[in-house]
Image (spheres, helix red, strand yellow):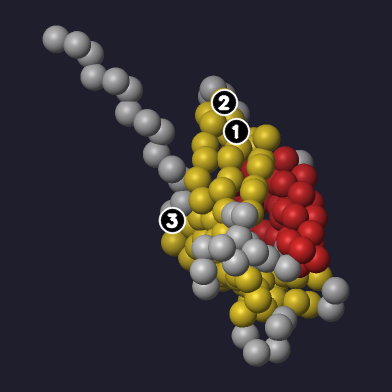
Amino acid sequence: MKKTDTPDPQLRQQLDAKIQKYNEAFDKNDAGAVAAFFTEDAVLVTDKGPIYGREAIEKHFADLFQIVHFSNHIDMADQYSPHIIGPAGNEMWSNGEWSLTLQEKTGDRIPLKGYWSEIFVREGDAWKVRMQMWNITPAPAPPAEAK
């Protein structure tokens, strides 16, 4: 793949619509709605390790949403995404950036951001996530004090 390759406009439109709905579900802290974007056999790769299957992914988010409230969830696909993979044309991968604000029940709001990558498969008319992986970009270190 060359950096100058542009994605199919119709496929990009489908991805952007999926991302918008995912952001909305995440901002509602709705574990069932977030998990519905994944296939039954999906893998969510987190900083604590992989989580296997939609049911376990839903439980992960339900547990997380009990202790942390998320808002301002924004995913943006890379300008060169998505990419069809496989000979049947029913799989694709995409990557991009994300940002959000999280707040523990008794804590301050914390802005976070990072990058994500997903592999999708087509299930009927919908693209479902088979594998999602993300990272958190470290916040810049405060400037060293002058001596």
Q: Is residue 84 above or below residue 112?
A: below
Measured from the top left, where is residue 47 in percent x and y? 44, 54
Do the residues bearing badges 2 and 1 touch, measured as CB atoms within 8 Å? yes
Q: Is residue 15 above or below residue 122?
A: above
Q: Is tag 2's residue or tag 3's residue first in the polypeptide sequence?
A: 3
- Secondary structure of the residue carrying tag 1 is strand
Q: Is tag 2's residue or tag 1's residue first in the polypeptide sequence?
A: 1
Disc number lying in front (2 or 3): 2
In depth, the one of 55 and 13 nearer the eye is 13
- Disc number at residue 10? none
Q: Which residue corresponds to mark 2?
A: 109
- Disc number at residue 48? 3
Residue 75 is at least partly visible in this image: yes
In depth, the one of 85 and 56 nearer the eye is 85
Q: Is residue 35 left or right of residue 140?
A: right
Do the residues bearing badges 1 and 3 touch, measured as CB atoms within 8 Å? no
In depth, the one of 109 and 126 nearer the eye is 126
Dot 1 amino acid type: Thr
Measured from the top left, where is residue 128 in percent x and y? 72, 69
Disc 2 from disc 3: Cα separation: 22 Å
Dot 3 amino acid type: Lys
Q: Residue at x 44, y 61 (%)?
A: 49
Disc 2 from disc 1: Cα separation: 6 Å
Measured from the top left, where is residue 140 in percent x and y? 37, 31
Q: Is tag 1's residue or tag 3's residue first in the polypeptide sequence?
A: 3
Going by the picture, which residue comes out furthest to the left? 147
Q: Residue at x 60, y 37 (%)?
A: 100
- Secondary structure of the residue carrying tag 2 is strand
